[in-house]
């Protein structure tokens, strides 16, 4: 039935956009970031001279 074609396009758009958002959010939150505090401790020990 051609009358149902817009409804089909709408459901396809909603499902693909939902899958796109879910994969992006999973990729973003699955990364382990190195904190800045660990980097500054190493550089602080390098510049702190004890004669």
Image (cartoon, rainbow, N blue to C red):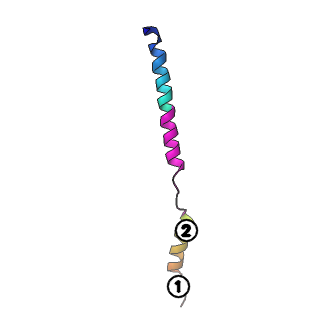
Q: Which residue is drawn at the image coordinates 52% and 68% (left, top)? A: 39
Q: Is residue 17 above or below residue 47?
A: above
**Residue 1 image point, x, y percent:** 44, 8
How many residues crowd around disc 2 within 10 Å: few (fewer than 14), some, or many (20 or more)?
Answer: few
Q: Which mark is residue 19?
A: none
Magenta stretch, main secondary structure class: helix
* Among the two numbered marks 1 and 2 on one chain, the one whose residue lies closer to the N terminus: 2
Q: Is residue 31 above or below residue 51?
A: above
Q: Which residue is drawn at the image coordinates 48% and 31% (left, top)? A: 17
> Which structural element holds mark 2?
helix
Where is mark 1, residue-wise?
A: 49
**Residue 24 image point, x, y percent:** 49, 42
Count the labels in the image.
2
How many residues crowd around disc 1 within 10 Å: few (fewer than 14), some, or many (20 or more)?
Answer: few
Q: Which residue is drawn at the image coordinates 52% and 44% (left, top)? A: 26
Where is mark 2, residue-wise?
A: 38
- Which residue is at the front of the view, 34 or 7? 7
Q: Which residue is drawn at the image coordinates 44% and 14% (left, top)? A: 5
**Residue 29 image point, x, y percent:** 54, 49
Measured in 3D between alpha carbons, the distance from the residue under mark 1 to the one under mark 2, in whole angstroms, is: 19 Å
Highlighted magenta segment, given as a residue range: 18-35
> Which structural element holds mark 1?
loop
- Which residue is at the front of the view, 17 or 35? 17
């Amino acid at each position: 039935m051609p009358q149902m074609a817009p409804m089909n396009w709408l459901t396809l758009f909603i499902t693909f956009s939902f899958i796109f958002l879910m994969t992006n959010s999973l990729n973003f939150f699955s990364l382990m970031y190195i904190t800045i505090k660990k980097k500054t401790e190493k550089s602080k020990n390098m510049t702190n001279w004890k004669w």
